[in-house]
């Protein structure tokens, strides 16, 4: 094992971690907003919204993320209307094409996770909120959404980790994130095993930290599941003789 080469590779790959995290954080945040809108559309009871959301989820869950990245990066530029639109300065950049593809993909999965969380809210909680005179928006913000987030958090944590790993596909459209830098080093040194071991270790550490953060949020949102602290009962002193 060439430790000098491993250390040099590690330094090179660490420099690409900010781009990987930027892709993941941006797509996850934008995808969460879109996923909530899709979940609300599914539960709205309005047929056009419901079937539009169903079709969206069907398409983006049923096609590979790699194909979606190719279609957005290479396909959108084929339409003159896109090239002459106000969005072209953004869509011609590989970073934003990758963010768009990752966002659209994660929203399709996260919407089903959020929808499951919303459906898991006990009806008694909703009825109690209505009995207290809460309006629909206040009830959704104070009662339904916090409970739904707590129920959906474990599944959504898995989706976050999947998206961090999915950022590796951005290297196919010239983005030099961790996997892109690793591929470049391999093309120069032909030492694939050592490079991918280091790259895999970096992804492992990132996902380990994310897992612990999700667990902390889950612990914070679940006060009823925490172990009660033992009561400290002072010793009873006997009467002085």
Image (cartoon, rainbow, N blue to C red):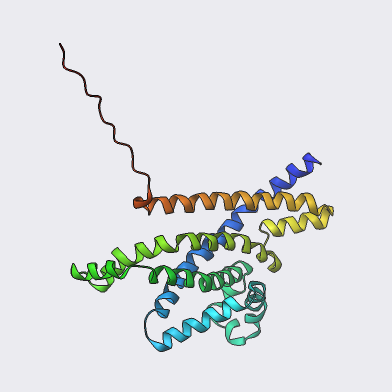
Residue 227 in the image, given as x and y percentages of width and height: 37, 44
In this view of the protein, which residue sits in the foreground, 168 or 210? 210
On screen, residue 143 above or below 42: above
Q: Residue 43 placed where, x, y %?
A: 39, 79
Residue 71: quarter of image: bottom right
Given the current orientation, which residue lies at the most extreme top position? 241
For this orientation, the residue located farthest to the right is 190
Can I make out residue 15 in this image? no
Q: Residue at x 28, y 66 (%)?
A: 125
Q: Is 179 situated left or right of 3 in this image?
A: left
Please identify the quadrant where the C terminus is shown.
Answer: top left
Choose between 162 and 240: the one closer to the eye.
240
Quarter of the N terminus within the rendering: top right
Res. 233 visible in picture: yes
User: At which x and y percent is residue 133?
Assistant: 18, 70
Q: How many marks?
A: 0
> Would residue 230 be found to the left or right of residue 171 on screen?
left
Residue at (54, 61) in percent of width and height: 158
* Residue sitting at x 38%, y 65%: 148
Looking at this view, is 214 or 178 the one in front? Answer: 214
Q: Is residue 224 above or below residue 50?
A: above
Residue 172 on image: x %, y %: 71, 67
């Amino acid at each position: 094992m060439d430790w000098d080469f491993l250390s040099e590779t590690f330094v090179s790959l660490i420099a690409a971690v900010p781009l990987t995290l930027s892709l993941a954080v941006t797509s996850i945040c934008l995808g969460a907003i879109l996923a909530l809108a899709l979940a609300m559309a599914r539960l709205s009871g309005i047929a056009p919204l419901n079937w539009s959301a169903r079709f969206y989820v069907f398409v983006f869950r049923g096609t590979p993320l790699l194909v979606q990245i190719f279609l957005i990066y290479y396909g959108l530029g084929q339409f003159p209307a896109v090239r002459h639109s106000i969005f072209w300065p953004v869509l011609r950049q590989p970073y934003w094409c990758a963010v768009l593809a990752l966002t659209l993909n994660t929203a399709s999965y996260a919407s089903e996770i959020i929808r499951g969380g919303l459906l898991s809210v006990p009806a008694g909680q909703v009825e109690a909120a209505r009995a207290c005179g809460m309006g629909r928006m206040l009830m959704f913000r104070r009662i339904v959404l916090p409970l739904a987030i707590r129920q959906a958090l474990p599944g959504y944590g898995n989706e976050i980790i999947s998206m961090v790993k999915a950022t590796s596909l951005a290297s196919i459209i010239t983005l030099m994130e961790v996997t892109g830098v690793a591929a470049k080093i391999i093309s120069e040194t032909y030492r694939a095993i050592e490079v991918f071991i280091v790259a895999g270790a970096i992804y492992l550490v990132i996902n380990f930290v994310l897992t612990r953060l999700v667990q902390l949020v889950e612990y914070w949102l679940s006060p009823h599941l925490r172990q009660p602290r033992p009561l400290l009962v002072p010793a009873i002193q006997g009467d002085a003789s």
